């Protein structure tokens, strides 16, 4: 009785003593690679700069310009719409596939592997491959994925669904396999049919997976960049009578990128301000969504 | 087992961190060490290069990379001055420059392509007026002066190029025409339309594909559009020396003439141009097309199979265009980093002088670049540049690269591409009106956006 806490204490003391050695590298890497650039990024959003070393502080000017930018507002609504549609589609389909593949079909493992594989291909490559596929079909009708923003939107939805369903499916499979057998059995004995079992037993039990997947789906949808760049790069544009153009299929991340590398000495600062707004938006949405779905999880 | 794994992981991480720090040190060591050691060793022979600095050349032209690396090596062997050459991947020069300039050892020698880029980077460029390299120039036609301070020489041209319509004269004759018929737009149109109408019988077509995807659209949104800008300049009797806030678009109908001719008398359907994927160069080289809209940099590739290839101006139906020449200019201008140390700046200028004066080095450079506007550089062997010189010698006017003044270049051009895509799919007046808006009002909007 008296020995146990002592040894526990010495382990704690030992851990305390050595913790800087083990924690140090990670903390240092985290500060160098994340915290410091992040703080600097926020600072730069208040500056006019071309090189970081001689940034000039100008206050909120960049934010004003960013918010006045019609293309940024368009990109925001477009991204929001895209994120919602892709979130729903990906999660419903991924859950359906995962459910089907946990019913003991022959060759489940093969299917899982095949469905997961698109996720291993990089976004840029996928964008180009799919643009070839879409154009191969659309060129028969004398058009192209670059010609109509509807094609661009649904093309991108198909692309990310194809890419991400497999990934989400793996998470759902893990969740479905963790549903307690006894609960399912009890439901069966109580006379619940398949749909009732699914909605009253299975889904409440996989809520943690749903939380993760909706979180990932939402942030992935907002942060999408490579696929957007490679598939349409914002084409087609609406050329407005005053000469400004709205890139109809440009999402937020791509808008920030093209602002940063656009001409004009002020553009990097404006892009930086957009990036900070973008961060606040994604972080806020993610957190809100997380706390919302967490409430629906059941404790096992 | 787990412990072992943990130890391995921890060690990898520590190693990675050490390696990160270490590599920085070693590279800065190696940059300075050879400079010292070799300056001792080669103290006797290397009497002329007095600089003790080093050179870091951020190269803009991917096709020059091999030559530049070899020349850098030769120079280091000869003088002991370390020269590092980094070439930005095609289309990513702006990004590479932004990243490299912020490092502790930024490029000492970089490229400024045009006035709007000078607006962004000119402050970091050394004033080259009166330097050894500026004194070697054979013309100041390609120099880039600071947009805010016209007396400051920010960058100097190291090569110039020309563009227009590349023609295969053999095919023109095979179709029963002669090059003498093509002296203006009407002549060009008659020949091109005749060839296109008999394409099946002749086995070749008039124009090679005019793709509007990223790898090819610059031929139309960067180059061919230049005819509007140049004729606007000529109509106003001026030459632009700074970015105009707006353009009139008076000659956009002429741009339409030529663009229509290109897309409607071509090997491919206009509606397939948006996606691209055709190989215009291969079509021209293999004799499947008689015309190819491009520039002097294609000479080496094209002359392999079409040795008689020649270049004609953009004939587009402007009065007096019989006297037009080729579009000559450059977006290749060397600048020296103003933030670099005095030794590095001197070493860089010495290196530049060597590149354009040394018979062997300048020969290698010219072989890649076509021509260099320096007194002691070897003469050009590029047939298209020789065509350009011949037009000038015959009293034709040179079409300057007014296109270099395009505001917010990438976005402005992307807008035109989008409008042209819609036009190629459906050649209606309304769709052309959008193209016109993208060209003319798009210019004013881009200018307003960046000023």
Image (tube, coloured by chain):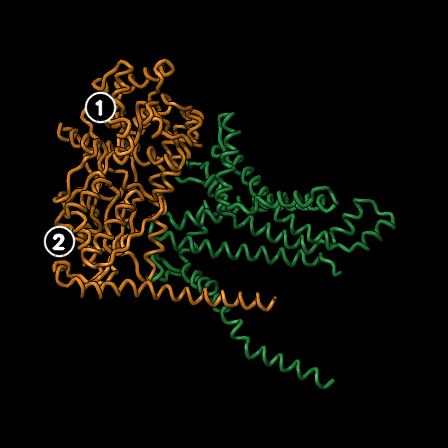
Chain colours: A green, B orange
Q: Position of residue B159 (x, y in %)?
A: 21, 42
Task: Give me the chain letter of mark 2.
Answer: B
Residue at disc 1, secondary structure: loop
Q: In the picture, which quadrant includes the C terminus of chain A?
A: bottom right
Mark with earlier residue (2, 1): 2
Q: Which residue does the image show at 69% across and 46% down from the upper left? A: A98
Q: How busy is the neighbourhood of tag 2: few (under 14 within 10 Å), some, or many (20 plus)?
A: few
Write down the residue under mark 1: B319
Q: What is the chain identity of the residue bearing mark 1?
A: B
Residue drawn at (13%, 43%) of the image: B138
Q: From the viewer's perspective, is residue B198 above or below residue A285? A: above
Do the numbered discs 2 and 1 sit on residues whose CB atoms are within 8 Å? no
Picture layout, residue A141 above or below residue A199: above
Establish if A49 lies above or below B307. below
Percent x, y of residue B32: 26, 64
The numbered disc on residue B130 is 2
- The x, y position of residue A7, in whole percent, is 66, 82
Left or right of B435 in this view: A202: right
Instruction: Tell me the element at label 2.
Output: loop
Residue B78 shown left or right of residue B295 in the figure: left
Q: Residue at x 30, y 39 (%)?
A: B246
Image quadrant in which you'd find residue B220:
top left
């Amino acid at each position: 009785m008296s020995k146990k806490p002592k040894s526990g204490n010495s382990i704690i003391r030992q851990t305390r003593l050595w913790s800087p050695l083990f924690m140090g590298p990670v903390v240092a890497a985290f500060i160098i690679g994340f915290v410091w650039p992040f703080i600097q990024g926020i600072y730069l959003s208040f500056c006019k700069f071309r090189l970081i070393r001689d940034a000039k502080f100008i206050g909120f000017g960049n934010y004003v310009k960013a918010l006045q930018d019609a293309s940024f507002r368009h990109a925001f609504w477009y991204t929001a719409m895209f994120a919602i549609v892709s979130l729903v589609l990906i999660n419903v389909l991924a859950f359906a596939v995962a459910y089907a593949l946990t019913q003991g079909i022959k060759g489940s493992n093969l299917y899982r592997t095949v469905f997961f594989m698109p996720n291993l291909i990089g976004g840029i490559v996928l964008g180009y491959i799919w643009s070839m596929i879409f154009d191969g079909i659309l060129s028969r009708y004398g058009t192209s994925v670059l010609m109509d923003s509807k094609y661009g939107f649904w093309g991108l939805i198909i692309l990310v669904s194809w890419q991400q369903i497999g990934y989400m499916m793996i998470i759902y499979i893990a969740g479905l396999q963790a549903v307690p057998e006894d609960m399912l059995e009890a439901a069966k004995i109580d006379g619940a049919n398949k749909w009732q079992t699914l909605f009253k037993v299975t889904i409440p039990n996989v809520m943690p997976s749903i939380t993760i997947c909706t979180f990932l789906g939402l942030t992935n949808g907002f942060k999408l960049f490579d696929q957007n760049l490679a598939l349409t790069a914002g084409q087609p544009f609406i050329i407005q009578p005053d000469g400004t153009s709205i890139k109809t299929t440009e999402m937020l991340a791509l808008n920030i990128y093209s602002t940063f590398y656009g001409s004009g000495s002020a553009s990097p600062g404006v892009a930086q301000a957009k990036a900070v707004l973008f961060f606040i938006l994604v972080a806020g949405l993610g957190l809100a969504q997380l706390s919302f779905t967490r409430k629906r999880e059941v404790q096992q | 087992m787990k412990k072992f794994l943990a130890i391995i992981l921890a060690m990898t991480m520590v190693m990675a961190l050490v390696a990160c720090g270490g590599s920085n040190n070693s590279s800065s060591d190696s940059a300075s060490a050879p400079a010292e050691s070799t300056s001792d060793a080669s103290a006797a022979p290397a009497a002329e290069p007095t600089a003790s600095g080093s050179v870091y050349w951020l190269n803009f032209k991917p096709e020059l990379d091999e030559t530049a690396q070899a020349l850098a090596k030769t120079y280091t062997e000869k003088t002991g001055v370390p020269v590092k050459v980094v070439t930005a991947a095609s289309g990513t020069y702006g990004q590479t420059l932004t990243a490299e300039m912020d490092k502790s050892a930024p490029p000492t020698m970089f490229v400024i392509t045009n006035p709007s880029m000078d607006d962004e980077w000119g402050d970091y460029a050394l004033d080259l007026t009166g330097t050894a390299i500026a004194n070697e120039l054979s013309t100041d036609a390609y120099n880039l002066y600071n947009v805010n301070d016209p007396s400051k020489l920010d960058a100097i041209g190291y090569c110039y190029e020309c563009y227009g319509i590349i023609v295969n004269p053999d095919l023109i004759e095979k179709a029963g025409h002669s090059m003498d018929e093509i002296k203006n737009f009407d002549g060009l149109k008659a020949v091109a339309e005749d060839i296109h109408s008999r394409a099946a019988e002749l086995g070749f077509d008039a124009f090679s594909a005019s793709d509007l995807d990223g790898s090819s659209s610059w031929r139309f949104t960067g180059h061919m559009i230049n005819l509007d800008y140049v004729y606007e300049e000529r109509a106003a009797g001026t030459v632009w020396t700074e970015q105009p806030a707006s353009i009139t678009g008076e000659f956009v109908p002429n741009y339409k003439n030529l663009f229509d001719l290109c897309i409607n008398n071509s090997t491919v359907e206009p509606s397939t141009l948006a996606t691209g994927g055709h190989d215009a160069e291969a079509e021209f080289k293999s004799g499947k097309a008689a015309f190819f809209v491009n520039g002097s940099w294609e000479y080496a590739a094209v002359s392999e199979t079409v040795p008689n290839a020649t270049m004609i101006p953009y004939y587009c139906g402007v009065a007096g265009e019989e006297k037009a020449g080729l579009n000559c200019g450059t977006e290749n201008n060397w600048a020296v980093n103003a933030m670099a140390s005095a030794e590095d700046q001197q070493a860089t200028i010495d290196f530049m002088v060597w590149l354009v004066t040394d018979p062997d080095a300048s020969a290698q450079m010219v072989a890649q670049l076509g021509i260099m506007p320096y007194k002691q550089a070897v003469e050009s062997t590029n047939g298209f540049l020789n065509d350009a010189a011949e037009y000038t010698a015959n009293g034709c006017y040179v079409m300057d690269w007014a296109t270099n003044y395009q505001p917010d270049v990438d976005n402005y051009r992307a807008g035109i591409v989008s409008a042209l895509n819609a036009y190629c799919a459906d050649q209606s007046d309304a769709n052309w009106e959008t193209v016109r808006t993208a060209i003319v009002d798009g210019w004013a909007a881009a200018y307003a956006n960046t000023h």
